[in-house]
Structure formats: C-alpha cells, structure tokens
Image (cartoon, rainbow, N blue to C red):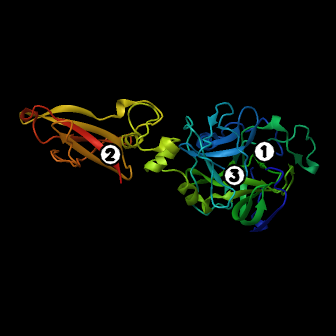
Amino acid sequence: MPARFKNYLVYFCLSLCLWQPIYALIFPSGDNIKNKSAPDAARTDIFNAIGRSMNTGNGSGSAVYLGGKYVLTANHVNLLSNISFDGSTLYKIDSAFGKRQIGDKDLKIIKLEKVPTGLVGATLNTATQETNKIGTLVGWGRGRSPSDTDSSNGWTWGNSATEDKRWGENKIAGTGIFQAYSDPNNTYTNTPVLITVLNNNTDDDEAAAAYLDSGGGIFAKFGTQWRLVGLTILSSDPSNFNNSDQNFFVRISSYASAIEALIPDPSILSDWKVDHSLYNADADNTADTDFDGIGQLLEFALGGDPNANDISILPTHALAEDGGSSYLELTVTRPKDLQGITYTPITTTDLTSWPSGSTGIVDDTPTPTDNGDGTETLIYRRSQAVSGVDQAFIRIEASEN
C-alpha cells in the first residue's frame, strides 16, 4: 500500500479465538521468485485477471479485470497510460472515459480501448459469508527486500526491482468499517472492509500485501466458483510488515450492484457508443467513424463495429419461390436483446415514394431464428409476387425509441 496511508481510523469486531494459523504477496518464509504463476487450474482465471497500471517498465498499482473492456481498481491508484496483465502486452486506457468512482469509496472503474485477449472477468461476490474463508490474494506489487535475512524485526518491502505478479493465501479473519482514511486528494468514509492478519509461523504460501498491490484482489471460493470478495486498499504498516500486521480490502459484497451499474451495457445504444469509444460528434447516430457507409445507429442495430470497416453486416436480398411464384425477401441478422430499437421493413415499386410503414410486407414482425451465437435472423417478404410488377425494392429502417 502507498506510504501515504499511514494514518487511519477503523472500527471492527474480531473474535481472537478465530485467528487460527493462516495461509497467506510478500512471503515471510519465502523469497521473491515463488508463486508467480497460477496456483492451480481452478484459479488460473483469477490469477490472469489481475493487471497493473504501467507504461513500460515499472507499474503504479494493481487492477482487476471485470470483463469486456472494464477494469476495477482502487481510486487512490495513480493510473498510467496502460493496463498489462502479463507484464508485456499493453492495453491502452480510454482516457476519454475517465474514471467512474463508486460513490465516495476507494473504488473506480476504468475502461480499456480494446478487449484483452484470453481473459475471463472476475465474478463479483454478493454473499456475506466471507469470514473464516481462506482467501487467495493476487497483486502486482513489490516483494520483500532481498537484504532481509533476519525476521526478528519484521521484513522490509523491496524496491521496484522486486515488482511482479504473485499470489498468496490468507484467512479472512473478520470484517470492519473504516470510519475514515485519506489520500492526498480524497477522504473515504464509512467503508466496509475485510481484514486479514499476518502470522509468520504458518505455511510458506502465507502472504501480505505490499506497496503497489493496491487495486489487486482477494478471492474466496463459494461452491466451485472463485469470486472477488475484496479489493486491496491498505496495509496497517506503510513500509514493512510484521507479525499481527493487517491488510484491508473493500468488501465487494457491499458494492457489487453499484459496480455493475457503472459498467456500460452494450445492449443500450448510448452505452454501446461509450463501449466503442464514441464521444462528441463521433457519437451522432449518423456519424460514420469507420467510413463504411453505415451510420452509428445502424451499426448498433445490425451488430457492427463502428471502428472496423465491414459492410458484411448489411441485410441481403433474394428471391424465394412459393406456390409457383417468386417473392422478394430481405434477410436481416441482428444482435439479440438490443434495447430501444425498432426495426421497420419498407417496400416500394420505385425509389422516390417510400411509404411510412410496412404496407406490402407479409409480416413486419417475423419469428426470428436463433443463430446460437448471440444473434438472430429475420426474413421479411413482399406480399406481391415479382411477376405482378416491373420492379420492386425492400429495405429495413432502424429507429431509436
């Protein structure tokens, strides 16, 4: 944790009889080269989901991948330009998105410009039975000082050369409420927290959070599922760690719904625009940022990417035989469950007098075919056979409700 978190006031209730030996990113009985890959297959996703704020070289804090383009970190973490989950691949932070802080708490959501490859977003815990579970801590902070050989007076945090992603274990000893703690720009009040305590007489995987682990997480197992139960924010000692030192984590079960509410919903047009980094004039419904001739509203309605030129999303037409006659049909593929969009098929026999509704369409709300990939296909047919007209046209209009 940053050294500025030296002064704090916390109210909590713990039963000392529950403080049994614990398994815990600094290891009292280990060195800095251990636990730098996932502990097992079941925890691979949660280990991989922890990133660091960085440009190149050293970082400025840890972060938890939530899925899509969204990352959760501590509000006090000073973000650099990128997030990396493997220490080399950089995902640029969308600076126009800024940050979305959860109330006045030490939590904020940031957005990346691209979806990270091969990651699974952390599952936010909503249950309140965290106490006494063995938590898995993951952070991208500093290790212990390599010069520490005598543990009688504790262990000192290392320098930037010891920064790496590590996992460790620690028992969640209890819960509490921080009345107040501050960074140079903010004061965080009445924050529910989870608490772990260091005990250097336990297993080699016991760990304590150190400098730059802020924004990382502690995960606990519920059934077969590993969930993010806490976000690392604070150590009781800002420079080193000793027996009985404590780590504090914002209790995710208290804020899971608030976190989810601040993540844009790509099924809503306005949120979809934010998700695709469309701001100001680029967010106009008629804007065409990828120059493929498809405006933003239609890109949304047809499942396109406004930042990738692709006309393959456009509807296709064909002649369908039925009862010895041919009919003009339009096939439309769209994402399932989009909100606030109306699709109106329109047909005409000339290009100058399009009607305002779906007159001449057999069924303007045909039953869609589920494609099994998050999309569905609809087919619109003209009611008049092509043999009865010299020419005919059909199109789909998408409008925002």
Q: Which mark is residue 204?
A: 1
Please tell me which residue lies in front, 253 or 131.
Answer: 253
What residue is shown with label 2? 398
Q: CA distance from mark 1 to mark 3?
A: 28 Å
Proximity of marks 2 and 1: CB atoms separated by less than 8 Å: no
The residue shown at (32%, 45%) is 398
Give x and y (percent) for residue 344.
Answer: 26, 47
* Amino acid at circle 2: Ala
Of circles 1 and 3, which is in front? 3
Q: Earlier in the sequence, mark 1 or mark 3?
A: 3
Q: Residues within 10 Å of mark 2 (few under 14, many from 20)?
A: some
Give x and y (percent) for residue 77.
Answer: 72, 48
Question: In this view of the protein, can residue 352 be seen by the observer?
Answer: yes
Give x and y (percent) for residue 88.
Answer: 67, 30
**Element at label 2:** strand
User: In the picture provided, is 191 more to the left or to the right than 401?
Assistant: right
**Element at label 3:** loop
Please tell me which residue lies in front, 3 or 227.
Answer: 3
The residue shown at (9%, 34%) is 389
For the image, the number of numbered tags is 3
Q: Which mark is residue 74?
A: 3
Q: Which mark is residue 369?
A: none
Image quarter for residue 350? top left
Q: Earlier in the sequence, mark 2 or mark 3?
A: 3
User: In the picture provided, is 331 more to the left or to the right than 121?
Assistant: left
User: In the picture provided, is 281 more to the left or to the right than 82?
Assistant: left
Question: In this view of the protein, can residue 19 be seen by the observer?
Answer: no
Q: CA distance from mark 2 to mark 3?
A: 40 Å
* Amino acid at circle 1: Asp
* Amino acid at circle 3: Ala
Instruction: Name the outermost residue toward the front.
Output: 352
Proximity of marks 2 and 3: CB atoms separated by less than 8 Å: no
